[in-house]
């Protein structure tokens, strides 16, 4: 008897990535401490690693993640500062930061750089 629940059947390795999984359309994002892998899951039997996107340095720690449309949003903590890096993931092989916002807890003034990239 079918339960109506689809269960992916493929297996793909995640190179040195751990932590959490975020699904958006035909993509899966495997999020690690300071980078994330982008997988094509349009065929669940054969997931394919498209790229790994890194935060600007190892000092960044991803504390939240969201993806929609052409963009992935990585909330981060870096040496007492918090913010969001916005990645353009239209072409996963060249995913890059296109905007960011940050808040230094010492002065409580936000930094915002980039264009409006909300979905």
Image: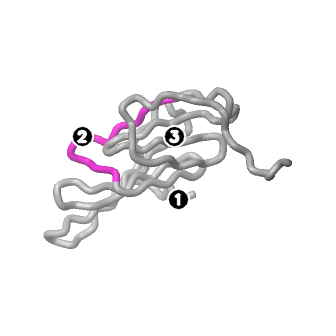
Q: Calculate the distance from the C-alpha at mark 1 to the C-alpha at mark 2.
A: 24 Å
- Residues at discs 3 and 2 in contact (Cβ within 8 Å): no
Q: Secondary structure at mark 3?
A: loop
As drawn, the residue found furthest toward the front would be 1
- Residues at discs 1 and 2 in contact (Cβ within 8 Å): no
Of 53 and 94, nearer the camera is 53
In this rendering, position of residue 78 left or right of residue 25: left
Q: Calculate the distance from the C-alpha at mark 3 to the C-alpha at mark 1.
A: 13 Å
Q: Secondary structure at mark 2?
A: loop
In this rendering, position of residue 55 left or right of residue 28: left
Name the residue beneath numbered marker 3.
89
Q: Secondary structure at mark 1?
A: loop
**With respect to residue 38, does 69 lie above or below?**
below
Residue 61 falls inside the magenta stretch: yes
Mark 1 or mark 2: whose residue is earlier in sequence? 2
Count residues near mark 3 (Cα–Cα under 10 Å), then give few for <14, some for 14-19, many for 20+: many
State which region is magenta: 50-62
- The disc placed on residue 21 is none
Residue 72 falls inside the magenta stretch: no
Residue 101 figure quarter: bottom left
Count residues near mark 1 (Cα–Cα under 10 Å), then give few for <14, some for 14-19, many for 20+: few
Mark 3 or mark 2: whose residue is earlier in sequence? 2
- The disc placed on residue 57 is 2
Q: Position of residue 39 (x, y in %)?
A: 55, 34
- Residues at discs 3 and 1 in contact (Cβ within 8 Å): no
Count residues near mark 2 (Cα–Cα under 10 Å), then give few for <14, some for 14-19, many for 20+: few
Q: Position of residue 81 (x, y in %)?
A: 22, 60
Quarter that holds the C terminus: bottom right
Name the residue beneath numbered marker 1.
118
Q: Position of residue 55 (x, y in %)?
A: 32, 42
């Amino acid at each position: 008897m079918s339960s109506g629940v689809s269960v992916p059947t493929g297996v793909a390795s995640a190179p040195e990535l751990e932590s959490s999984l975020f699904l958006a359309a035909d993509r899966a994002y495997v999020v690690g401490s300071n980078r994330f892998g982008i997988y094509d899951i349009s065929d669940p039997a054969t997931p394919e690693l498209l790229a790994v996107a890194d935060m600007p340095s190892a000092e960044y720690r991803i504390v939240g993640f969201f993806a929609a449309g052409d963009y992935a949003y990585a909330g981060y903590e870096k040496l007492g500062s918090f913010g969001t890096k916005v990645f353009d993931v239209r072409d996963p092989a060249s995913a890059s930061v296109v905007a960011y916002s940050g808040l230094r807890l010492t002065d409580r003034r936000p930094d915002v750089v980039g264009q409006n990239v909300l979905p």
